[in-house]
Amino acid sequence: MELKEFTVGELMSKSYIISENGNALIIDPGAEGEKLYNYLQENGLILKYIINTHGHFDHIAANQYLKEKTGAEILGHPKLDSKLKDPNLNLSQVFMQQKIKSPALDRPLNDNDLLDFENLKLRVLYTPGHSADGISIYLENNKILFSGDCIFAAGVGRTDLSDSSFQQLINSIEEKLFSLPEDTVFYPGHGPKGTISTFKNRVWPAVK
């Protein structure tokens, strides 16, 4: 498995391309679709899936570009779909005065779904709190988590948005993420990676 990390857009969002056997998936193509596509082209990769951890504009803005270029399926929580189509709900109109839209969801991902990709098994964890459509993706055999804007190396996602809930965020973290092995490495939607152990023991007591 090859994991490539990109920092994209004005909000410095993280996009992750996972590849295996010439096929690839991308998690949160938040901007700069051409840069992401060029990486695929340069490495001879066929993009199969676009996975959005949630529907805020800084995580979906390159969906349309990559969908048009590759035909990859867009995957995410069922509640994602309305945000893909509505610049107010995905906050691009509110924060950026832009009308960012994405093609519709091709396949819903529900809590505990298992996505088989080449030799990898991706477990879907429904982790609302920052956003009602929030999911995290756990690579079971690799002990790698893509946490979106649920948790960061030094904090948690904001919960002052229209469909945010701090109590839901607490539940997502304590019931879902803390059930993972403590040496799980997580890659968040912004900033550097961390481990569940470090977050649990150093970050969470200060946040909660």
Image (tube, rainbow, N blue to C red):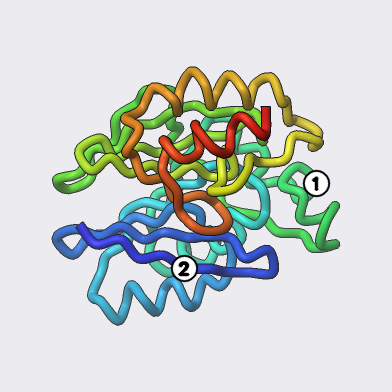
Q: Residue at x 85, y 52 (%)?
A: 94
Residue under label 2, please give it.
Answer: 6
Whether 31 is drawn above or below 184: the answer is below
Residue 128's x, y, as percent? 60, 28
In the image, residue 30 lies at what x, y percent?
Answer: 57, 60
Query: In terms of secondary structure, where does tag 2 sit?
Result: strand
Q: Position of residue 65 (x, y in %)?
A: 52, 67
Query: Residue 189 at what x, y percent from top left?
Result: 55, 52
Near-viewer residue (159 or 39) = 159
Q: Amino acid at mark 2?
A: Phe
Q: Residue at the spot x=71%, y=26% of the render?
A: 166
Label 1 neighbourhood size at 10 Å, few (<14), some (14-19), many (20+)? some
Mark 1 or 2: in front is 2
Q: Are marks 1 and 2 in contact (CB under 8 Å)?
A: no
Q: Which mark is residue 19?
A: none
The residue positioned 40% from the left and 49% from the top of the image is 73
Q: Nearer the viewer, residue 71 or 168?
A: 168
48 to the left or right of 161? left
- Identify residue type, mark 1: Asn
In the picture, measured across the screen, residue 15 lies left or right of residue 59, that is left
User: Which corner quadrant of the image does residue 181 belong to?
Assistant: top left
Query: Disc 1 and disc 2: Cα gap in Å?
Result: 26 Å
Question: Dot 1: what SS?
Answer: loop
Q: Earlier in the sequence, mark 1 or mark 2?
A: 2
At horizontal 53% and vertical 68% (from top left) the residue drawn is 7
Residue placed under numbered mark 1 in the picture: 88
